[in-house]
Image (cartoon, helix red, strand yellow):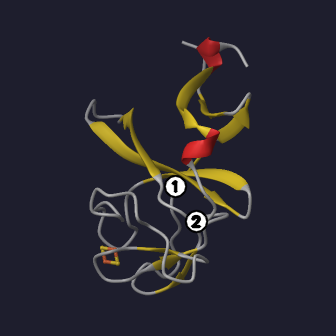
């Protein structure tokens, strides 16, 4: 993929299945940096805006640990909201009815990329 349509996030090897997420930032609509996460689940990479749908604070309190102990859910460290890693849908806790905002990540050549719109 051409560099002007994708932004490098991390090496594929940086993301282990149900392991620590890689944090990165995006430019928010208001010009402020927006926290985001790249993670791997069942072999595939996924990206989400790092903001709980209960209260818009970071899910992981800055360490990239977003999976619960089972490795099957993303959990908010504040009040325990649970999200599915493969689509961000809320399945438990105070986020009910709302999902994480997904980001278009893909892997190529041993690296993880965020698809971006050409300027
Ligand atoms: S802020 Fe995430 S569950 Fe309350």
Q: Nearer the viewer, residue 10 or 113?
A: 10
Residue at horizontal 61 percent and vertical 77 percent from the top: 72
Quarter placement of the C terminus: top right
Quarter placement of the N terminus: top right
Q: Locate ligand 1 by image quadrant.
A: bottom left
Residue 81 is situated, as x and y percent measured from the top left of the image, at: 42, 80
Q: Nearer the viewer, residue 40 or 48?
A: 40
Residue 85 is situated, as x and y percent measured from the top left of the image, at: 61, 67
- What label does residue 101 carry, if any? 1
Residue 61 is situated, as x and y percent measured from the top left of the image, at: 27, 62
Residue at horizontal 69 percent and vertical 39 percent from the top: 106
Picture quadrant of residue 33: top left
10 Å neighbourhood of mark 2: few (<14), some, or many (≥20)? many
The secondary element bearing badge 2 is classed as: loop
First in sequence: mark 1 vs mark 2: 2
Relative to residue 23, is residue 55 drawn left or right? left
Dot 1 and dot 2 residues touching (CB under 8 Å) = yes
Q: Which residue is mark 2?
A: 88
């Amino acid at each position: 993929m051409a560099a002007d349509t994708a932004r490098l996030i991390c090496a594929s090897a940086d993301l282990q299945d149900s392991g620590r997420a890689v944090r990165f930032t995006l430019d928010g609509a208001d010009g402020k940096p927006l926290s985001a996460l790249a993670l791997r689940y069942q072999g595939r990479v996924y990206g989400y805006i790092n903001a709980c749908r209960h209260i818009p604070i970071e899910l992981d309190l800055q360490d990239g640990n977003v999976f619960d102990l089972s490795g099957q859910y993303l959990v908010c460290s504040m009040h325990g909201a649970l999200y599915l890693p493969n689509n961000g849908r809320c399945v438990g806790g105070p986020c009910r009815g709302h999902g994480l905002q997904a980001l278009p990540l893909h892997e190529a050549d041993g690296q993880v990329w965020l698809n971006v719109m050409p300027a």
